[in-house]
Amino acid sequence: MFQENAGSIRNMEWLRTIFGIRERKKHGLPSPVFLTNTLSGKKELFISQRPGIVLFYSCGPTVYGPALIGNLRAYVFSDTIARVLQCAGYRVQRVINITDVGHMVGDNDVGEDKMSVGAKREKATPEEIADRYTKLFIEDLEDLHIHTEDIQFPRATAYIKEQIALAKTLEEKGIAYRLSDGLYFDTQKFPNYGKLGGLSGVKLEAGARVKVVQGKRHPADFVLWRVAKPNDLQQWDSPWGRGNPGWHIECSAMIRSLLGQEIDIHSGGEDLIATHHNNEIAQSEAISGRTFVHYWMHNAFLTMGGEKISKSLGNGFSLSDVVSKRFHPLSVRYFFLQAHYRTPLSFSWEALAGAESALDRLWKISRNVAGESRRKGAHSEVRERFLASMRDDLATPQALGILWDSLKSEDYTPEEKWGLIEDADTHLGLSLVNTPPVDALKEEDIPIQIRDLLMRRETARAHKDFKTADRIRDEIEKSGYHVDDGPFGAVLTRTTF
Ligand code: AMP
Ligand code: ZN
């Protein structure tokens, strides 16, 4: 049996591509998917460590306020990676952590803890704040059609013991040192520190923390355990005194506990590359001596007026803000998918309105095709092209272009179009197969011949003649209407506009 062995063929770029595709087909392995790996800076053929299984971790939100739509771009992105891999035949095991301790306002060990900022603002405990915003975050993901039931959402405060254990191992190995205010990782003891994004050497020095903690051996060294200040709201016992964990160690600990020492994919926004992800690599690889993550993937920012949208800058909107302006949450998803994940995307209400009207048109076309094809999909060359673009580093703008061109074209049968809609639905999550309900029609708006068909169908159903009832339903659907049997009788909606 062909075994996927990433290590042995990793260096043979061209051979790997050819060998991979041919062998995969022969052995019924998942279809080839190409992803841009921040580690190499190149688009690579994805090869999982274990055949058919993907271990996938995404850095989660710091739950001290509602997620802003900038954050949500990161999760639509990771959901798209998961959908593409699942559709290609992989089983994807997913974790998104919930940061409910240890993340400082300055992102770099300085400033106040974000959870305590949230707790003071809302006169609540950090636990209450974490509960409130974790629930809201998961609801936001569901509104965006992200399959939350397939994802584990561990909280950093539930893994304090594991974080202390990792920090202790690093200290025992001589890679961490104590200062009066905590335990620090010694970046100079980790060869290749800063390899992600090519930040070693001069660039690393230049980009390192501005405000240097007294006694740190190198500006890039980072805290693993922080000794508590008297008024710190969250503190636990540890070998270094009461305190709380540094931000980066939580991801290393939860990944190790839930997915193992070596995972396939790790994702996050591009702001995490320089510090957070390089620090995760350093901590994890210094302990295991193994490759921590094989494919690092990062999304570019959602911006507004040229600036990153972020909670700490306070310049963004939440999904509830978007919905309160009467936008459908999926218009946000469509808006994100119009741009490639590696391209910065500028938000404006006009642009969102444009996305919403495009999605609305797509839903109307899908309803028409559903009626014309009777929801029977046929294979076609256009489905192959759609899949190829999604598997080519999630080329969503191209995939949407293929979808639009084919649905507008007369070259495809309704069945071929429906087949494409089914594939587009599983890859893009835009509710194209089960479009949101349109308002039921008032009786006086229904043309007389449709009313007649409806009555004949009701009579057939009353006589339990379901064959005739189904035939009449097809006739109704072909005329551009959709009939649903609700608890109070048949409900008619229009599918053509
Ligand atoms: P945070 O809650 O700030 O820890 O961020 C959660 C996730 O959202 C991380 O993966 C960030 O990199 C990502 N992120 C934050 N702001 C933006 C933005 N404006 N555009 C895209 N991704 C973002
Ligand atoms: Zn992380």
Image (cartoon, rainbow, N blue to C red):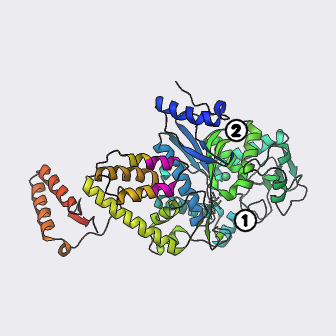
For this rendering, which residue is in front, 21 or 177?
Answer: 21
Direction front: furthest residue: 411
Q: In which quarter of the image is residue 372?
A: bottom left
Which circle's residue, 1 or 2, is located before the other in the chain? 1
Q: Residue 18 carries which label?
A: none
Quarter that holds the C terminus: bottom left
* Residue in front for this viewpoint, 202 or 122: 202
Residue 83 visible in rendering: no
In percent of the image, x 51 and y 52: which residue is there? Answer: 80
Q: Is residue 493 left or right of residue 336?
A: left
Instruction: Give the dominant element type of the magenta stretch: helix, strand or loop.
Output: helix
| Ligand 2 contact, mark 2 (Cβ < 8 Å) | no
In percent of width and height, residue 249 lies at: 72, 49
Q: Which residue in the structure is indicated by mark 2? A: 291
In this view of the protein, can residue 476 be seen by the observer? yes
Q: What stretch is highlighted in magenta?
A: 385-400
Q: Position of residue 44 (x, y in %)?
A: 61, 43
The residue at 50%/40% (across/down) is 91
Q: Residues within 10 Å of mark 1 (few under 14, many from 20)?
A: some
| Nearer to the camera, 39 or 128 | 39
Q: What residue type is labelled 2?
A: Thr
Q: Name the residue under label 1.
A: 105
Amino acid type at circle 1 is Val
Residue 391 magenta = yes
Give percent across and percent down for residue 480. 23, 63
Mark 2 secondary-structure assignment: loop
Disc 1 CB within 8 Å of nearest ligand 1 atom:
no
